[in-house]
Image (spheres, rainbow, N blue to C red):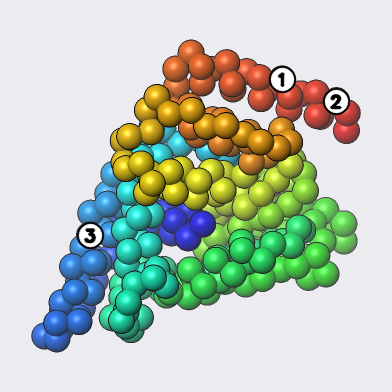
């Protein structure tokens, strides 16, 4: 979760100001800062882009994003013993994210707010009673207002059309935290967990069994797990496009 928000703003210009200190703790912080910066270089093309579904990522972007996520977990994770947060890099200093939550979620809210804090940024929670998408204000107005005051917009909504409309009018990156068709952040977390279990680059040939409904989580997991774009991937994408057309017809 943290990784997807972080990736939209990590850049060499943000990370070039490394404060040099003499203490061993500070030296460790500098090394971690440089490590995060080096991992972000291959993802420079993602800067400023929306992130609405997992298939928007190239194979390289997905691979490097997972690598960066592991580095961030190692640097900021709660399992890191004896960590001093004052000595960790703050790549999201002076950045803020508006979190639109039409649908409540404990883990998504807690992980985003905590992650932004650890990385030096600020998260603003907007629940159903705080912002009414397309009701009292148009989707375009909401998108424009949030873009003026924030560097990112994260949306957890019912309809995928809502997140598409937000991204259409926003002047800052929009991140899909869940819609009825896609859940890319969950897939990033799932793939990262699988790589931690089996090792990076060792997922080829593995079969993932899905037990449950055919829903948004499954959509992105099918797309993400089947990369690179083989014949199997193209078949999955055509199937999901057909499902989306049927969904829109029902609406």
Give the number of the disc on residue 249. 2
Residue 39 at what x, y percent from top left?
27, 52
Mark pair 2, 3: CA separation: 48 Å
Label 1 CA crowd tier, 10 Å (few <14, some 14–19, many 20+): few
* N-terminal label among 2 and 3: 3
Residue 94 vertical position relative to residue 209 in the rendered view, above or below: below
Viewer can see residue 170: no
Q: Residue at x 32, y 67 (%)?
A: 75
Residue 63 at what x, y percent from top left?
35, 40
Image side of residue 37 versus residue 105, left or right: left
State the SS at label 1: helix
Q: Which quadrant would the C terminus be assigned to in this image?
A: top right
Q: Residue at x 51, y 17 (%)?
A: 232
Tell me the residue that label 3 is attached to.
35
Residue 32 at what x, y percent from top left?
24, 67
Label 2 CA crowd tier, 10 Å (few <14, some 14–19, many 20+): few
Give the number of the disc on residue 242. 1
Image side of residue 143 versus residue 206, left or right: right
């Amino acid at each position: 979760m943290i990784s997807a928000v972080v990736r939209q703003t990590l850049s060499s210009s943000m990370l070039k100001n490394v404060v040099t200190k003499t203490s061993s703790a500070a030296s460790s912080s500098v090394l971690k800062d440089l490590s995060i910066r080096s991992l972000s270089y291959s993802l420079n093309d993602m800067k400023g882009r929306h992130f609405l579904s997992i298939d928007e990522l190239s194979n390289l972007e997905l691979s490097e994003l997972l690598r960066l996520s592991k580095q961030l977990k190692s640097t900021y994770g709660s399992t890191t013993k004896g960590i001093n947060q004052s000595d960790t890099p703050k790549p999201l200093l002076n950045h803020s994210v508006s979190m639109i939550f039409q649908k409540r979620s404990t883990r998504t809210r807690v992980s985003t707010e905590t992650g932004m804090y650890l990385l030096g940024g600020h998260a603003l929670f907007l629940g159903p009673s705080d912002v009414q998408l397309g009701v009292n204000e148009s989707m375009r107005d909401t998108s424009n207002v949030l873009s003026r005051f924030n560097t990112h917009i994260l949306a957890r909504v019912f309809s995928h059309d809502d997140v598409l409309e937000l991204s259409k009018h926003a002047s800052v990156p929009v991140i899909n935290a869940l819609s009825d068709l896609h859940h890319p952040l969950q897939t990033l977390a799932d793939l990262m967990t699988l790589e931690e279990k089996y090792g990076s680059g060792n997922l080829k040939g593995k079969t993932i069994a899905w037990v449950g409904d055919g829903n948004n989580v499954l959509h992105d997991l099918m797309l993400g797990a089947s990369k690179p774009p083989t014949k199997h991937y193209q078949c999955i994408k055509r199937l999901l496009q057909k499902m989306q057309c049927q969904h829109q017809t029902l609406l």
